[in-house]
C-alpha cells in the first residue's frame, strides 16, 4: 500500500512538472514571436515612412497607399505610447494637405510631410533601441492643436471664436435714502415786558427785607 502511494505521488509530481515546463516554454515562445513580429513591423514602418518622405506628393492632394499599410502595421506595436504617436503622425500625414490646416498651423504641406516622417523615424528608432521617446516638435504640436478646428471648417462648420468677455453686471439700484431726522424746532422765549421785570424786582426786594 505504501509503495502504491509513492508511485501515485511520483506520477502526480511528474505530471505537474511536465505541465509547468510546457506552459513556460509556450509563454517564452509566444513572447519571442511577439517581439520578432514587433521588430519586423517596426522595420516595415520605417521603410514606409522613408518612402512617404522621399516620394513626391500626388497633385490631387490624396494620401499615398503607403499610409494605409502603415496604419495596419501600427496595430502590431505593443507599446501604447509608441502606437499612439505613430497613429497621430499617420493621421496628420493624411490631413496636412488641407488648406485649412495649413493656414491654422502655419506649416505648409511639403514641410509637414518632411517633418512628420522624420519624427516618426525618430520614434520608431527609439522604440527599436529601447530608448526614451523623443518630445513632440513644436510644429507637430501646432498641427495637433489646430487639427479639430481645421476639420470643422473643412466640413462646412464655422470657425471657433474666442468667447467674448461677459458684460459687467449692472450696478445694483442705490438703496433708498434714509429719511432725514426731523429738524428740531427751537422754541422762542417770549421777551418779558418792562412791567413784568419791575414786578419781579419789587418782589425780590420785599423778600430780602423780610429776611432781615
Image (cartoon, rainbow, N blue to C red):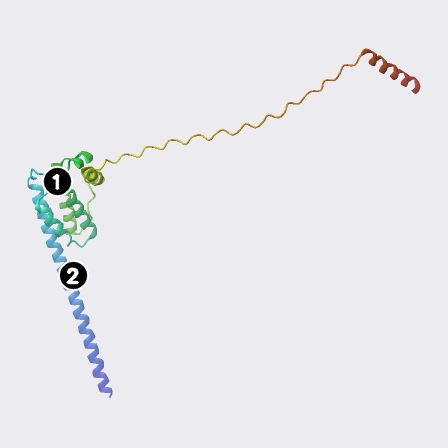
Q: Is residue 106 above or below residue 79?
A: above
- The residue beneath circle 1 is 113
Residue 173: numbered disc: none
Q: Is residue 49 left or right of residue 13?
A: left
Residue name at image x 14 percent, y 61 percent: 32
Q: Is the N terminus in the top left, top right, bottom left or bottom right quadrant?
A: bottom left
Mark closer to the chain start, 1 or 2:
2
For the residues carrying marks 1 and 2, which lies nearer the camera in this image?
1
Residue name at image x 12 percent, y 54 percent: 39
In the image, residue 18 lies at what x, y percent?
17, 73
- Please tell me how crowded label 1 is: few (under 14), some (14-19), or many (20+) other residues with Cα within 10 Å: many
Give the SS element for disc 2: helix
In the image, residue 102 lies at what x, y percent?
16, 35
In the image, residue 41 lies at what x, y percent?
11, 53
Give the SS element for disc 1: helix
- The residue beneath circle 2 is 31
- Foreground residue, 120 or 68? 68
Residue name at image x 20 percent, y 52 percent: 80
Amino acid at each position: 500500500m505504501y509503495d502504491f502511494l509513492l508511485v501515485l505521488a511520483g506520477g502526480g509530481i511528474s505530471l505537474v512538472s511536465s505541465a509547468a515546463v510546457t506552459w513556460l516554454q509556450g509563454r517564452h515562445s509566444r513572447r519571442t514571436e511577439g517581439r520578432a513580429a514587433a521588430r519586423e513591423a517596426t522595420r516595415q514602418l520605417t521603410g514606409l515612412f522613408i518612402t512617404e518622405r522621399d516620394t513626391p506628393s500626388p497633385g490631387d492632394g490624396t494620401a499615398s497607399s503607403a499610409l494605409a499599410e502603415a496604419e495596419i502595421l501600427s496595430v502590431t506595436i505593443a507599446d501604447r505610447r509608441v502606437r499612439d504617436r505613430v497613429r497621430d503622425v499617420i493621421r496628420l500625414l493624411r490631413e496636412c494637405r488641407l488648406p485649412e490646416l495649413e493656414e491654422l498651423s502655419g506649416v505648409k504641406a511639403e514641410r509637414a510631410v518632411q517633418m512628420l516622417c522624420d519624427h516618426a523615424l525618430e520614434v520608431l528608432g527609439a522604440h527599436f533601441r529601447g530608448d526614451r521617446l523623443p518630445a513632440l516638435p513644436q510644429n507637430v504640436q501646432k498641427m495637433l492643436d489646430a487639427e479639430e478646428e481645421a476639420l470643422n471648417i473643412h466640413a462646412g462648420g464655422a470657425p471657433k471664436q474666442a468667447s467674448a468677455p461677459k458684460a459687467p453686471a449692472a450696478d445694483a439700484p442705490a438703496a433708498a435714502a434714509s429719511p432725514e431726522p426731523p429738524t428740531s424746532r427751537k422754541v422762542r422765549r417770549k421777551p418779558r415786558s418792562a412791567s413784568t421785570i419791575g414786578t419781579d424786582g419789587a418782589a425780590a426786594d420785599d423778600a430780602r427785607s423780610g429776611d432781615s
